[in-house]
Image (cartoon, coloured by chain):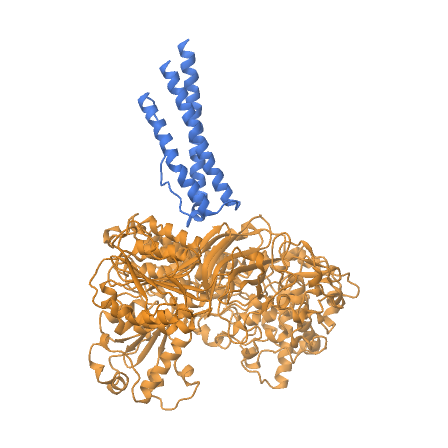
């Protein structure tokens, strides 16, 4: 039962992180199509960097405590309005990679959740 | 150079050729054109007349008139096709010539250039200058470098268009002017010459029979087409300069013994008869393994004439904006991705939107008061000479996106019989590639800002000791009357050391009030309104302030610098209006936010992955501030003075992202550097400046600008935010093809700079240029512009040095040059026995040298010991903003020997040019009996040889001639020699006002000064582990051959 709750938690936290990353990718796409300017982008991205890290951290701790292997991606995190365009493709790629990774995690967390449900029976 | 002038009338070397000579030359040239043209599209199936026999064989004589006509008629043709290949020309009723007048495109407005008037007369010789006879004989094989010649006249563009366009297999003459001229004379002729198989398109030969009009047209004397819009070919006169440029023409006989073959003018004997070369080459007789390469240093190409702009840009499209505003790395745009991938040099442009125009060529200002600015509905292109009016003037077609726009009622004008607007001569925007529109209110987000100058001055102890404060106070005061935008100009000051000092300059005061803020953590503005005042209202207060400024702080012993907080304070004051912030900093920021530490130029960091970290800003504060400054339209210019490390890498970031500039005066001392600072600050304050600007470059479908390089901030993917722009700033950009294949024949570029002029008017500076699309790589290389290529390569390398090792940045330059030359070699290696010769396109003959110079430039050279970190960074920031000409001057400075001129008693105006020729930049050029002047645009070095006669030294430097030259400054003395030398220096300085080259005296053998000022800058020598020119060429050659 404890396992199931842990996986349920991690599932929702994962969803939250994925939502944040998706939002960031959307911001970059908006920038490319000129809906927002670099200043807005920088402030949007930088504002949600901290929440993202916190949720990631929580997820990590959860997995650690509940004895599951997880590491999380890091790099340099803040975006500067002055250089956004030269780094645009790299930043976007980085986030898409992150998204794929999270999707993978999500898949596993669902898998383990179901496993623990099935296991209980 | 003369290339700025579309009419190279003055380029004829011998204009006064006797009539008979001219006749024969005409004949000759026409026959040459014949050869050339046929050489283009046809495969050498039969070679009835070897090229070498071309020069006026008797049999050709009867065809004289014919040939002449050919020459004259073609100009009309070629441009038509290239110019508007997609254009639906009027129905061909009577053959090509009659078609033109009725063609809808005739509406393209342009007053016929005067020289086209003779067109239509059967005899052309007067306008078409043949090469002087003397020149003819040494060049028995004339070739063409034809830009894009289509033998077919308009009508629907034949499918083979590209093929024909690219048929540049026609041998080229070295001379680029000649090249264009001959291109005009392209005529289809019976096949007889050889051509390069790869360039031959079967379609071309099949295509031209389909145009029966051609043959007859050849005989038709008239080619009235040439005044067509922008597509008019250069009038015959333009093309005339068969004359060699730079001595290449006459050179051949001399050159071949030396081992340098100049583009086919002296074909090597080993080459099949009639096979002429399209390239220049250096014969390198190197025996593998031997050290002595057998390469004569004298024959290496050197840009001793300075920057020569390629003439094809404006010649093919005379309505293009002048190349001082826009230079493409190649004026032949590749038509496919695969072609782009084989062009290994940068593909892009260098734009200098506000370049200074010489007297009489000012940019016309157009005010569409009633109509609003005429722009394309879809792509927002501004109306320009290349748009075409149709439907009796009611519609115009956008040249970039081909959308048919309605002509507003107020802008309507009838079309005349030839399809041109009747009001063409009153419409500069339709005849001139560069205009300035007065922008109405919809182009403003706020009322146009007044010019605003704000000074942030470090008054810590070093500023006082070095005398910097005094010099700038005096200079600013002397410039107050000349600040642009009077009477709206605003001005303000903040000084700082460990505290921040604000000055209330309210006009009602008699003396400025100083307010000191010492709370650096929480900056506030003590007085929001009167820190920034109108100059004309508060003039007396400002004068009083500047007078008392040096004395106010003369006893200051504060060594701290609260730079970051002061910067924030300046930002708060300026953020209402924007403007220009001039920062005078002489120590490392040490207090408050943005404080920097001595990062130390650690020798151990070099060669490791951490090396680049020293060249990028340490504290994100600077990036953040730069972004904020740009947002509020503040441009930052940084003046740095310290003799110690000041972290220019961080400070310069402020200038980099705000469209500013970094001035660095290492170890500033007013006794030495006063003139330089005074001049450059005055220039900064008084030059015409455009405020709160944004710039965008538009181009035709299928082409997209991908990256931008220079000092600015990108506001969106293609919008450059430039809080302030002036004539000394240039921006480089690269473009890429979006589609795999371009279907258009011409790509148009339009640079638009929306700005507020100092007079308070919102304006749009628009530069339009066209370039042909080609399908042939050789053509791209042929039309390359070394200056633009080098400028872009340099910027890319400097950017690379910010994230990689210097070594890698240099290697990248070398690799690109090698790849380009290799690709070029592969083009010709098959048909020609190139052997061990190094071959390169004539247009890029200086590329290897400039590449070497780039690697040896202050920003990229060597490693730890080769230049100070701050100097390196400052040079990098400076080079990122330099216009092409200035950049080339810096890379390959001029070296003049002046003693002969000084000693000579007679003084004629042209004497200087005659006696003082630029010398190769090598120690070999220095002669210990002479005086040499080295000029790179940033500093002048006067070098005294050891064995120079003491009289001369005494005359020039007085009794100091035996002492240490570092303490001697050159002043005018009471003798002819000294006056002459000063006149030379003045002349060199006058050539370009953007920087003030300070003069340093150096005596031969006086180390380390000699090494620092001169020897390390002799690009062709082997200095500090870097190759010399010969070794470099050999190295490149070796790599190319691999």
**Measured from the top left, where is residue B329 in percent x and y?**
50, 60
Q: Residue B854 at x, y = what percent?
A: 38, 62
Residue B70 percent location from the top left of the image = 68, 72
Is residue A67 toward the left or the right of residue A121 in the image? Answer: left
Is residue B253 among the parts visible in the rendering?
yes
Q: Is residue B35 visible?
A: no
Residue closest to the eye, B357 or B138:
B357
When the figure is inspected, residue B860 is found, relative to residue B969, above or below; the finding is above
Residue A77 shown left or right of residue B118 in the figure = left
Task: Name the image quarter holding residue B364.
Answer: bottom right
The relative height of residue B635 versus residue B1000 in the rendered view (above or below) is above
Give the total of numbered labels: 0
What is the quadrant of residue B154 in the picture? bottom right
Against B315, is B576 above or below?
above
**Left or right of B445 in this view: B961:** left
Q: In the figure, the blue chain has which letter?
A: A
In the depicted view, which residue is nearer to us: B946 or B54?
B946
Given residues B503 and B175, the one toward you in this image is B503
Quadrant occupied by the C terminus of chain B: bottom left
Give the farthest residue toward the bottom: B906
Picture coordinates of residue B110, whole percent (x, y): 66, 69
The chain letter of the orange chain reads: B
- Residue most toward the right? B93
**Residue that lies at the very extreme toward the front in this rendered image:** B508
Above-or-below relation of B584 to B657: below
């Amino acid at each position: 039962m404890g396992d199931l709750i842990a996986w349920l938690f991690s599932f929702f936290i994962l969803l939250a992180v994925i939502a944040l990353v998706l939002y960031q990718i959307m911001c970059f796409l908006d920038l490319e199509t000129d809906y927002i300017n670099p200043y807005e982008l920088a402030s949007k991205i930088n504002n949600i960097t901290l929440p993202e890290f916190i949720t990631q951290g929580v997820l990590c701790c959860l997995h650690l405590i509940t004895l599951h292997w997880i590491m999380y991606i890091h790099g340099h995190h803040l975006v500067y309005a002055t250089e956004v365009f030269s780094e645009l493709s790299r930043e976007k790629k980085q986030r898409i990679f992150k998204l794929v990774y999270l999707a993978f995690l999500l898949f596993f967390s669902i898998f383990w959740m179901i496993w623990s449900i099935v296991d209980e029976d | 150079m003369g290339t700025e002038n579309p009419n190279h009338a003055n380029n004829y070397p011998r204009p006064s050729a006797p009539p008979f000579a001219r006749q024969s030359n005409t004949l000759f040239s026409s026959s040459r054109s014949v050869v050339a043209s046929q050489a283009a599209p046809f495969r050498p199936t039969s070679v009835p007349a070897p090229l070498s026999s071309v020069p006026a064989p008797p049999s050709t004589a009867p065809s004289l008139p014919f040939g002449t006509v050919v020459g004259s008629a073609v100009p009309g043709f070629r441009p038509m096709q290239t110019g508007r290949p997609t254009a639906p020309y009027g129905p061909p009723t009577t053959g090509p010539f009659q078609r033109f007048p009725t063609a809808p495109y005739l509406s393209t407005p342009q007053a016929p250039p005067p020289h086209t008037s003779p067109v239509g007369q059967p005899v052309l010789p007067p306008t078409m200058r043949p090469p002087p006879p003397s020149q003819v004989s040494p060049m028995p094989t004339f070739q063409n470098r034809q830009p894009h010649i289509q033998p077919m006249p308009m009508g629907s563009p034949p499918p083979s268009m590209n093929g024909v366009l690219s048929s540049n297999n026609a041998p080229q003459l070295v001379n680029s002017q000649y090249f264009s001229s001959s291109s005009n004379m392209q005529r289809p002729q019976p096949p007889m010459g050889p051509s390069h198989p790869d360039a031959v398109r079967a379609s071309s030969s099949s295509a031209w029979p389909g145009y029966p009009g051609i043959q007859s047209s050849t005989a038709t004397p008239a080619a009235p087409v040439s005044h067509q819009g922008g597509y008019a070919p250069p009038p015959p006169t333009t093309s005339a300069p068969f004359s060699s440029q730079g001595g290449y023409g006459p050179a051949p006989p001399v050159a071949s013994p030396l081992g340098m073959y100049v583009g086919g003018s002296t074909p090597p004997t080993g080459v099949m008869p009639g096979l002429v070369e399209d390239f220049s080459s250096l014969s390198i007789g190197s025996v593998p393994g031997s050290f002595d390469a057998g390469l004569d240093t004298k024959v290496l190409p050197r840009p001793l004439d300075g920057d020569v702009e390629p003439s094809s840009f404006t010649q093919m499209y005379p309505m293009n904006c002048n190349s001082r505003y826009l230079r493409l790395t190649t004026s032949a745009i590749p038509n496919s991705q695969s072609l782009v991938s084989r062009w290994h040099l940068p593909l892009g442009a260098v734009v200098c939107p506000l370049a200074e125009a010489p007297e009489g060529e000012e940019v016309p200002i157009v005010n569409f008061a009633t109509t609003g600015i005429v722009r394309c509905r879809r792509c927002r292109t501004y109306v320009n000479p290349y748009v075409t009016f149709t439907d009796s003037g009611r519609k115009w077609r956008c040249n970039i996106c081909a959308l048919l726009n309605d002509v507003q009622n107020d802008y309507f004008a009838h079309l005349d019989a030839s399809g041109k607007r009747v009001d063409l001569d009153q419409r500069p925007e339709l005849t001139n590639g560069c205009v300035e529109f007065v922008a109405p209110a919809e182009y403003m987000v706020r009322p146009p800002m007044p010019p605003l100058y704000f000074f942030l001055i470090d008054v810590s102890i070093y500023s006082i000791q070095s005398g910097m404060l005094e010099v700038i106070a005096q200079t600013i005061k002397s410039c107050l009357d000349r600040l642009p935008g009077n009477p709206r100009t605003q001005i303000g000051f903040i000084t700082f050391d460990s505290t921040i000092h604000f000055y209330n300059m309210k006009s009602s005061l008699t003396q400025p009030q100083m307010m000191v803020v010492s709370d650096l953590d929480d900056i506030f503005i003590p007085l929001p309104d009167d820190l920034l005042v109108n100059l004309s209202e508060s003039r007396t207060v400002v004068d009083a302030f500047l007078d008392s400024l040096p004395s106010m702080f003369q006893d200051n012993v504060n060594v701290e610098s609260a730079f970051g907080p002061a910067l924030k304070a300046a930002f708060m004051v300026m953020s209402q209006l924007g403007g220009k912030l001039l920062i005078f900093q002489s120590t490392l920021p040490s207090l408050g936010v943005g404080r920097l530490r001595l990062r130390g130029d650690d020798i151990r960091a070099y060669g490791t992955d951490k090396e680049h970290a020293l060249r990028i800003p340490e504290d994100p504060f600077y990036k953040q501030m730069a972004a904020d400054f740009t947002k509020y339209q503040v441009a930052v210019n940084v003046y740095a003075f310290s003799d110690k490390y000041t972290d220019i890498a961080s400070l310069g970031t402020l200038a980099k992202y705000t469209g500013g500039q970094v001035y660095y005066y290492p170890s500033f001392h007013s006794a030495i550097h006063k003139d330089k600072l005074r001049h450059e600050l005055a220039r900064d304050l008084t030059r015409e400046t455009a405020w709160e600007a944004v710039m965008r470059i538009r181009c035709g479908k299928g082409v997209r600008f991908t990256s931008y390089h220079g000092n600015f901030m990108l506001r969106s993917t293609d919008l450059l935010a430039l809080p302030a722009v002036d004539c000394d700033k240039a921006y480089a950009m690269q473009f890429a093809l979006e589609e795999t294949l371009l279907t258009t024949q011409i790509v148009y570029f339009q640079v638009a700079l929306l700005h507020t002029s100092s007079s308070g008017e919102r304006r749009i500076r628009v530069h339009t240029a066209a370039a042909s699309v080609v399908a042939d790589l050789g053509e791209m290389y042929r039309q390359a512009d070394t200056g633009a290529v080098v400028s872009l390569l340099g910027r890319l390398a400097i950017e690379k040095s910010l994230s990689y090792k210097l070594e890698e940045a240099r290697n990248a330059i070398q690799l690109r040059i090698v790849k380009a030359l290799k690709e070029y070699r592969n083009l010709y290696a098959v048909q020609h026995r190139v052997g061990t010769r190094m071959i390169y396109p004539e247009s890029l003959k200086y590329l290897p040298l400039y590449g070497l110079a780039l690697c040896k430039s202050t920003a990229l050279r060597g490693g730890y010991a080769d230049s100070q970190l701050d100097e390196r960074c400052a040079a990098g920031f400076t080079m990122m903003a330099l216009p092409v000409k200035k950049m080339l001057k810096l890379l390959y400075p001029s070296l003049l020997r002046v003693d002969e001129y000084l000693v000579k008693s007679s003084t004629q105006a042209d004497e200087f040019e005659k006696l003082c020729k630029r010398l190769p930049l090598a120690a070999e050029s220095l002669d210990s009996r002479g005086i040499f002047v080295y000029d790179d645009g940033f500093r002048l070095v006067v070098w005294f040889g050891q064995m120079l006669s003491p009289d001369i030294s005494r005359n020039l430097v007085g009794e100091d001639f035996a002492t240490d030259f570092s303490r001697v400054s050159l002043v005018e003395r009471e003798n002819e020699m000294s006056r002459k030398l000063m006149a030379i220096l003045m002349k060199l300085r006058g050539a370009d006002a953007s920087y003030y080259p300070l003069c340093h005296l150096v005596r031969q053998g006086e180390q380390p000064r000699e090494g620092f000022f001169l020897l390390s800058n002799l690009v062709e020598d082997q200095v500090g582990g870097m190759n010399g020119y010969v070794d470099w060429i050999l190295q490149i050659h070796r790599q190319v051959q691999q």
